[in-house]
Image (cartoon, grey):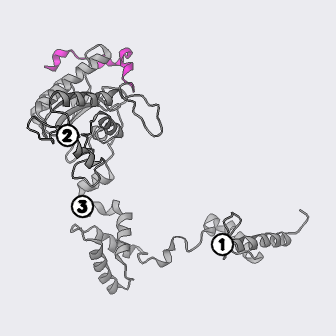
């Protein structure tokens, strides 16, 4: 450029002074601006250059970043004390924690804190305090809900079943508009395809429904493949496990769930999925109740559902047509996702190719083994 380094820095300094001036003007909205206290002298720039050469990018991070100089919980001792109060099994509220902490702070030379500070640390350290504050079950529910292991690599390697209170309201011959159905659902963990189902009016399932649901699954698989095929392994919770174990052992390899494991498999994820919810929405006739009626967020217009309470489908044929439509949608409706609007259905996703698969012969069982 034909100029020496000091002259170059002088030109750069002049440019930066203009940008600092822009940065001090609130009405300036352009990109050519710097903070008003940005160092621009030749000496300051050389100091910054040397610091960057020796310490790297940490030298350009301001010491006030994160405002830790003003933090009142700023060492391991104060943090440990606050977390111990938040972990207390009495579930102290933020005001009580603040009160106990400040008593300790007076005795140990620490600054007082506010309930807002307690709330901030409570949210930031949920993983550390949940087990002590709410118990192991709450910790598992909130922080380790994922199912350990991987999904099976092929259909019918792992099948699960569970009960589900269907979120539809029906009326009976006596005019009661709050009748519901409970279902036993059999699903393939490979792709969450519903293989079989059995539903009755009520809130509690019957053991006979498990038999019926697996029989229904066999006929559904036959409708797809043309043959009688059964699963290799099944998962189920401990409900009626002693009575149903002979059935489980006769149709597959059964491994009992571990104690206290609420999220033992993938079927719970199916029940809470968008695909399950969308299928219910499309099958319903203004009688879908979404979340529990006592939930904080209902997920539906309660007034509209109440307005149509007199016109709800009757239990029996009308209800069964709606429920069958719901399960048909679960199987055949494309499993739309935000990132994949051309997704296949659960039935198409890995199942239709079974007709020509050879591996399935290794798990083929005669229907007589079911009885």
Question: Residue 361 magenta-drawn?
Answer: yes
- Residue at which label 3 appears: 134
- Which of disc 1 and disc 2 is earlier in sequence? 1
Tell me if mark 2 has few (under 14), some (14-19) or many (20+) residues whose alpha carbon lies within 10 angstroms of its own: many
Query: Which label sits in the foreground, 3 or 1?
Result: 1
Q: Residue at x 11, y 34 (%)?
A: 206
- Which of disc 2 and disc 3 is earlier in sequence? 3
Query: Which label sits in the foreground, 3 or 2?
Result: 2
Image marks 3 and 2: residues in contact by CB distance under 8 Å: no
- The disc placed on residue 35 is 1
Q: In the image shown, does 334 or 300 lie closer to the viewer?
A: 300
> In the rendered image of this protein, does residue 151 appear above or below residue 155?
below
Q: Can residue 88 be seen here?
A: yes
Tell me if mark 1 has few (under 14), some (14-19) or many (20+) residues whose alpha carbon lies within 10 angstroms of its own: few
Q: Quadrant of residue 210?
A: top left
What residue occupies the far top of the structure in this picture?
A: 226
- The disc placed on residue 169 is 2
* Span colored in magenta: 348-371
Query: Which label sits in the foreground, 2 or 1?
Result: 2
Q: Quadrant of residue 314?
A: top left
Quadrant housing the C terminus: top left
Q: Residue at x 29, y 36 (%)?
A: 280
- Mark 3 vs mark 2, CA separation in Å: 34 Å
Label 1, secondary structure: give it. loop
């Amino acid at each position: 450029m034909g100029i020496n380094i000091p002259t170059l820095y002088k030109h750069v300094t002049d440019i930066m002074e203009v940008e600092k001036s822009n940065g001090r003007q609130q009405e300036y909205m352009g990109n050519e601006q710097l903070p008003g206290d940005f160092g621009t002298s030749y000496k300051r720039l050389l100091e910054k250059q040397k610091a960057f050469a020796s310490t790297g990018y940490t030298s350009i991070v301001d010491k006030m970043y994160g405002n830790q100089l003003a933090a009142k919980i700023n060492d391991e001792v104060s943090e440990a004390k606050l977390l111990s109060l938040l972990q207390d099994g009495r579930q102290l509220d933020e005001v009580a924690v603040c009160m106990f902490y400040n008593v300790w702070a007076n005795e140990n030379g620490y600054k007082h804190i506010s309930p807002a500070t307690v709330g901030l640390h409570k949210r930031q350290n949920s993983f550390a305090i949940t087990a002590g504050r709410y118990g192991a079950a709450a910790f598992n529910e909130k922080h380790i809900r994922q199912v350990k292991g991987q999904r099976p690599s092929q259909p019918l390697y792992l099948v699960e079943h569970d009960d589900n209170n269907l979120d539809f309201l029906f009326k009976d011959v006596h005019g009661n508009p709050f009748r519901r159905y409970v279902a036993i659902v059999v699903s393939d963990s490979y792709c969450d395809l519903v293989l079989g189902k059995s539903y009755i009016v009520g809130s509690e399932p019957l053991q006979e429904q498990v038999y019926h649901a697996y029989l229904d699954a066999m006929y559904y698989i036959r409708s797809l493949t043309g043959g009688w095929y059964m699963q290799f392994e099944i998962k189920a919770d401990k409900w009626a496990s002693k009575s149903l174990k002979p059935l489980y052992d006769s149709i597959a390899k059964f491994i009992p769930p571990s104690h206290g494991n609420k999220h033992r498999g993938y079927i719970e994820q199916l029940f809470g999925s968008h695909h399950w919810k969308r299928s219910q929405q499309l099958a319903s006739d203004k009688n879908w109740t979404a979340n529990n009626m006592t939930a904080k967020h209902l997920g539906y217009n309660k007034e509209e559902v109440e307005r149509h309470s007199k016109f709800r489908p009757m239990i029996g044929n009308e209800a069964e047509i709606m429920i069958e439509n719901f399960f048909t949608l679960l199987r055949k409706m494309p499993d739309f996702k935000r990132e994949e609007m051309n997704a296949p259905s659960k039935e198409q996703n890995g199942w239709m190719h079974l007709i020509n698969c050879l591996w399935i012969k290794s798990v083929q069982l005669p229907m007589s083994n079911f009885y």
